[in-house]
Image (cartoon, coloured by chain):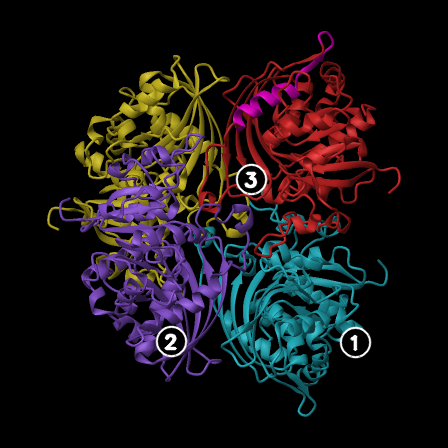
Chain colours: A cyan, B purple, C yellow, D red
C-alpha cells in the first residue's frame, strides 16, 4: 500500500460515508487510513459501530465491507489530527460540516459531499470533466482563509447530471435557458430518516426541501467562468427553472430537460455534440473516469434509472429522447439518468480528489 | 328506473368498460341497459365473461360489480341494435372504435374513451367546464356524415388535467406557451397488457408511445374556438411541449407544468384565478360535477397522486407548488394531479353525456 | 353532542393517534374531548402541532382532519386531569405507556394500542367477537392495583386477524397447532422512523423485532379461558410458530396460515364455520361492528391486501385459499388479510371501548 | 472458440431465452452457436427480432447483448437440424416444449427450463449438488423412447432453493415434513404477459397457478432415490405443504420454511450442517458452481431478496433466521432466498449441462 494517499473518511458510519468506503475499496492511489464518526460510535471498531441494538449489521451498500475497515477503531470527528492524513473525505450533514471541515482544511484538503460551503465565493464546485479549470480558486481560498488545506465540495446530486449534459451544449451551441423536472431516487435522501415507505409507495412527492434552489444556483456556478481579478467565479448567465420530485426508485435520478440554445441545432447535432464531448483534458484518464461521460441512447424507452444508472460504474450520464422543443428559442429536450450516489456523490468526490492531485493542487 | 336514459357499454369486459359500469352504478339519470364485448365473451353472462380459466373473477375496479350487470347477457358488439338504446359508452381500443362507433353513431350518441375520432375536424373534444361551447360541432358532424347520432370522444387522460388548469389561466391572463413533464400512473395503460411489473418497479419509463403528440394537439383543440363559418374549431395558438413518463403509481397522473402567460401574474393571482374559476355555466351542477373543478393546495408537499387523486370523487384536479418561473415570459410553474381513470376517462365521459343532455344536444 | 362519552386521545400527533381521531370523527357515542402529546407539541393548536418546519401539514390518514380537533389546544400528557374525561385512548409508544397509562387508569379506563401491559396477568387482551368474556378481568386489575379505572390494551396488529380466524375453528373443531408466515404492511411500523423506502422497495425484510413472540403469546392468551379462582386467564394450549416478514404494501397484513385441528374438517366445513361464526353476543351490534367478522372468498387470487383490506370499513378479516394441508394432523391452510391500522389498531380499540361500555364495565 | 460445445437456444427471444444467452456469454466450454424462435422472428437477425414496432430494443437482462448473437439469423424452431449442435437449451413454454423438445432429443441432449417433461417417470429432475446421481435415468429414457439424445428439465424456480436447503438436512438429520410459504418475485412469471404492475403495486397476490403442486411433487422427486430395477426414481417420503404468493420484488424468491426433522437438531447444528454441506462430488468444481451452495447469515434481518439474490452470481441459496419451531416434531424454521432466474432457471440449466458432461452422459 506504500505510496497511496492516506485519507480519513468523516461521517463514516452513515450511508454516504459507507459509499466512500466502498468506492475506495480497490482504489489504485487512495486508501482509507482512518474512519471518523460521532461520539456515539467513537472508540468502537467500525464493524461494531454499524451493529444496531436489534442485531442488524447496518452496512447498506451492495459492495462488501472491506475487512481492513471493519476492524478499524472509529475516531471521534473532533479527535482527528489532520497532519496524519493526506486528505479527508467528508460525508457529514451540512451543520456538522460547517464546524468540522474548516478545522481539517487548516492542514489538508477536504473533499466534501456536504452542501455547507458550496456557495462561498472562494470555493469551487467541481465536476472534473466540466470545470476542472475552476480548481485554482482553492488558492484564493487558502489566501483568504489563511489555511494550508482547502474545502472542495461536490455539487448536489441532481445538479451533476444536468451540468454534465449542458456542458457540451454550452460548448457547441451556447445555453440560454433550462427548464427541468426531476424524478429523484429515494437514496438521495439518505437513511436518517430518509424517505419513508409510507410516503412513496404508490406515490410521487412533488417537493424536495431546498433542492430546486440548489440546482439553479449550482448549475450556473459550475458552468460559470473563473475570473482572474478579482479571483472569483462569474456564474453562467443561463436562466434555469426546476421542479424537483421524488419517485419510488432506489437509485438514479431521472431528469426531463428542456434547453434553449443560443444557436439552432437539430437533435442529431445535439446527440453528436454529446457523444463527441470529451470534457476537460485533465479529467479524461483519471482512475475513476469512465470511457465516456455521456452515453446517448437511441431506444426511445431509455434511459431508465434501473437499467442505466450503473453505466460505466455509475460514472456516466445517460441521455435519450432527444427531440426538438417548440416552446423555447432554439429548443431541444431530452431525458437524462445520473447515478445520484455514485457520480453524484462519493465516487464523484473521489474523482475530484483525483483531478486536484493530477493538477498538482495538493 | 323508468325515465333513466338507457345506455349500452361497449368494450364492457375491459378495465375501461368496468370503470363505466362502476361509475354508472348509482347514476341518477343514466342506466346500463346492456353490455357488449368481443365475440369471445358474447352470449355469456357478464359475470361469467369475467371469469378466467384459472378461476379468477376479473373485475378490477374497487367498487363492487352491480348484481344487475353481473347477470346481463353480453352482446357481441356487432349485434347491438342502436335504436334499443338512448346512447352508447365506448371503451374499446382505437382500432375497434374506428369500425364500431360510426355504426352506432348512425342512430345514437356515442360517448367514447377511444382516440379514434378525436382529431377529426367535425368532432368536438369535450371537457365540460372548459369547452362546453364546442358541443354544437356535433350538428356539423351529423350534417357532413348524414347520421342521426354522433361521436363525442373524451381527451387523453393526460390532457384532461392540463387543459382544466390552463382554462382559468387562459381566461384571466392568456396562455402563450406550456412546457410539461408528466409522471403517469400505470392504470393509464390498461391491462392488455398494461405496464408489467418487471418494467416499472424501482424504475421510471421515460416514454409513452404517441402520448406527447396527443397532449399537444388535444390541448390546443380543447382551448380553441368554435368558428361559425365554416363550422370548425380553430386551435388555440399556444405552443405546447411535453415529455411523458411512466412511474410506479397505480392511479393519478402528476404533471409538472411551466406556463408562459400573456400578461404577468403572481403565484397568488394565479392561485386565486384557479380557485375562483367556475367553468362553463352548463357544467356547474351536472350530476357528476364536483363542487370545484380545481383545488389549490398550500402545503408544498402536495399534490401527491395517492393522497389527492380521489378529491371530489376523482373529478377535481388538484394543484400545488405554484411559483414564479424565471425562464418563460411571464412564467409560472405548478404541479397538478388528475385522476386518469375517473375525470380522465369513464367518469369524464359520463360528465360529457350529462352536459350534452343538459344542452339538449340529444 | 350531549350524552357522548368524552375521550382524551394521548399520543395524538403520531400516526396511531391520528387514526384514533379519524375513527372517532363521526362516532355516535364517543367524542374526542381533548388531545394530548409530548411537551414539544403542548400548548399549540393541534393543527399547528402537525405543521413541520418545511411547511408540511403532517396529517397522514386519508380521512380529513376534523375541524373541531384541528383547533383544540394540545395538552401535555402529564397535564391531563383524568376526571375531566370518561375514558382515554392511548397511542403512545410502549415506554411512554408504561408511565402514562397507569396514572390515567387510577381514575378512568384507558384503551391502549401500546404493548406495555398486554402480558400482565391481570390485564385482558380483548378482541370483542373472540373473547369479550375476558373483560371481567379488569375488576381483578382494579382490586389488585387499587385503581378506579383500568387499562385495556388491544393485541398486536398481526395477532388480531389470526386470532379472529382461529376463533370459529376452535369453537367448531378445536385448534391444536398453528404455523403462520406473515407478509406485513409498512404502516404497521408507524412513521418514527417507520420502514424506510430504501429498505423495502424491490425487497422483503424477513424479520420484525419481537413480533413473532408477541403473536405467539397473545394468540394463546386471547383464545384462553378466564378462570374464576384465582381470577386469571389460562392460555390456550395450542402450539403456535410464526415467521413475520415485511413487504412493500401500505396497509393490510397478509398471513399464510396452516392449522392443525382437533378433529378432521374439510375445507368446505371450515369455510362454513368461518362464514357462520357470529362471535360473542355482546359484540354483534356495536357501533363499529361489521356485518360479518370474517368474509371467506372463493376466488383463488383473493384475499389481496390492496383489494380486501377495507372490507366492511377495515373491520372484517378476509380469508381465502382454504385447502387441506397434508403435513399437520387434521391440517387445513388458508390465507387471511386483516387491516392492521383499522381493526388491528385504533378502530379495534374503539370497538373494545364499545364492548366494555355495553357490558357495563365502565 | 474451437473445442467449445455448440448449443442452440430455443425460445431465444423471450426473457428466459435471453437469460440463457447472457449466461453463456463468457462460458468457458459452451457457446451459443444458433438461436431459434417462433416463425414471427425467424429469418431476422436476433437484434432485429428483439426490436418492437415502437422502436424498443426488447433485451431485458442487465448484461449486454453479445454482438455475436445480435447478428445471428434467428432460425424457426422447426428448422433446427439437431445434428448441427452438441446440445440444445430450451426456454420455450410448456406447450411448445411438448412438441419441440422430443424432436430435438432424438439426436441431442435438451436441457430445458420448461415443465413439460418434469414429471415423466424416465426423466430426472436435476439440481447438480443435490441429485447428480439421478442422471443415469436418462439412459432409461433413451432406451424407452428409442432416442439418442435426452431431455433434462430443471425444476420450477421455487423448488430449487427449497430442495437445496433440504438436502443437507436430509443428509444430517432426515426430513419428515415441510411447511413452506413463498414470497415470489415477479420475474418468475416472465413477460408474456408476466405480472402486471396494476396487480402487484401495494399488494400481494396469494396464488400462483399450479405452483404449489409443482413444488410439492418436484421436491419429493429431487430428494428421492434412483432405483435400479426397474430403473425409476422413488420419491422421498416427506410430506410437503406449501402456499405460494407473489410480492413486489423484481428478482429473488423468498421462502419461509418450517421443517420437521427425523432427529432433533439445534439451530446451531442445522446451521453447521448447511454451512458444511458440499453437495455431490461431481458438482463441486463445475464452471458455474459457486464456492458454497448455501450461505447461512447471522444478521436476523437477512436474507433479503434485493441484498442476497446475487450471492455468488445468483448460484448460492442464502439462509437466515434459523430458529427452533415448536409445532412440528423436531421442528426448525428458517428463511431462504434463491435467485429464481439464475440458479432457478437458465444458469441452473447450464450447470446441469456441465454436470452431465462431467459425468460423461453426453
Residue C7 drawn at (x, y percent): 22, 48
- Estimate how packed mark 1 is, as few (under 14), some (14 to 19) or many (20 or more) residues with alpha carbons within 10 Å: some
The answer, for residue C43, to whether it is visible in the render is no
| Residue drawn at x 38%, y 76% as measured from the top left | B236
- Relative placement, left or right, of D262 versus C216 is right
- The CA span between labels 1 and 3 is 49 Å
Residue D177 quadrant:
top right
Question: Are marks 2 and 1 in one subunit?
Answer: no
Question: Are marks 2 and 3 in one subunit?
Answer: no
Q: Classify mark 3: helix, strand or loop.
A: loop
Note whether A195 is above or below B320 in the view shown.
above
Residue B166 drawn at (x, y percent): 36, 72
Q: Nearer the viewer, residue B184 or D294?
A: B184
The answer, for residue D2, to whether it is visible in the render is yes
Magenta part of the chain: D211-230
- The CA span between labels 2 and 3 is 48 Å
- Residue D185: mark: 3
Label 2: chain? B
Outermost residue to the bottom: A229
Note whether C124 is above or below A181 in the view shown.
above
| Residue drawn at x 60%, y 44% as measured from the top left | D306
- Residue B236: mark: 2
Q: Is residue C142 magenta?
A: no
Residue C360 quadrant:
top left
- The CA span between labels 2 and 1 is 56 Å
Residue A125 drawn at (x, y percent): 64, 75
Q: Nearer the viewer, mark 1 or mark 3?
A: 3
Q: Are marks 2 and 1 in contact (CB under 8 Å)?
A: no
Amino acid at each position: 500500500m506504500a505510496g497511496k494517499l492516506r485519507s480519513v473518511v468523516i461521517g463514516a458510519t452513515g450511508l454516504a460515508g459507507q459509499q466512500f468506503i466502498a468506492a475506495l475499496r480497490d482504489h489504485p492511489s487512495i486508501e482509507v487510513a482512518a474512519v471518523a464518526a460521532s461520539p456515539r460510535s467513537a472508540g468502537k471498531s467500525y464493524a461494531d459501530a454499524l451493529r444496531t441494538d436489534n442485531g442488524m449489521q447496518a452496512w447498506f451498500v451492495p459492495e462488501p465491507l472491506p475487512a481492513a475497515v471493519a476492524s478499524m477503531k472509529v475516531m471521534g470527528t473532533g479527535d482527528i489530527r489532520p497532519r496524519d492524513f493526506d486528505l479527508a473525505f467528508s460525508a457529514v450533514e451540512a451543520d456538522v460540516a460547517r464546524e468540522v471541515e474548516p478545522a481539517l482544511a487548516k492542514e489538508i484538503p477536504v473533499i466534501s459531499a456536504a452542501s455547507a460551503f458550496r456557495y462561498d465565493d472562494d470555493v469551487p464546485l467541481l465536476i472534473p470533466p466540466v470545470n476542472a479549470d475552476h480548481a485554482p480558486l482553492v488558492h484564493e481560498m487558502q489566501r483568504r482563509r489563511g489555511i494550508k488545506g482547502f474545502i472542495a465540495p461536490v455539487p448536489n446530486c441532481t445538479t451533476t447530471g444536468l451540468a454534465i449534459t449542458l456542458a457540451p451544449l454550452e460548448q457547441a451551441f451556447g445555453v440560454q435557458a433550462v427548464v427541468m423536472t426531476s424524478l429523484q431516487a429515494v437514496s438521495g435522501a439518505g437513511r436518517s430518516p430518509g424517505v419513508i415507505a409510507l410516503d412513496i409507495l404508490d406515490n410521487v412527492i412533488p417537493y424536495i426541501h431546498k433542492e430546486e434552489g440548489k440546482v439553479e444556483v449550482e448549475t450556473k456556478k459550475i458552468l460559470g467562468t473563473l475570473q482572474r481579478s478579482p479571483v472569483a467565479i462569474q456564474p453562467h448567465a443561463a436562466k434555469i427553472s426546476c421542479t424537483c420530485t421524488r419517485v419510488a426508485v432506489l437509485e438514479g435520478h431521472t431528469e426531463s430537460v428542456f434547453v434553449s440554445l443560443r444557436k439552432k441545432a437539430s437533435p442529431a447535432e445535439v446527440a453528436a455534440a454529446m457523444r463527441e464531448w470529451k470534457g476537460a483534458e485533465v479529467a479524461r484518464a483519471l482512475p475513476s473516469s469512465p470511457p465516456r461521460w455521456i452515453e446517448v441512447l437511441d431506444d426511445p424507452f431509455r434511459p431508465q434509472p434501473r437499467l442505466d444508472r450503473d453505466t460505466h460504474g455509475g460514472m456516466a450520464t445517460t441521455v435519450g429522447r432527444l427531440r426538438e422543443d417548440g416552446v423555447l428559442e432554439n429548443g431541444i429536450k431530452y431525458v437524462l439518468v445520473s447515478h445520484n450516489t455514485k457520480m453524484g456523490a462519493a465516487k464523484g468526490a473521489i474523482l475530484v480528489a483525483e483531478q486536484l492531485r493530477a493538477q498538482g493542487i495538493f
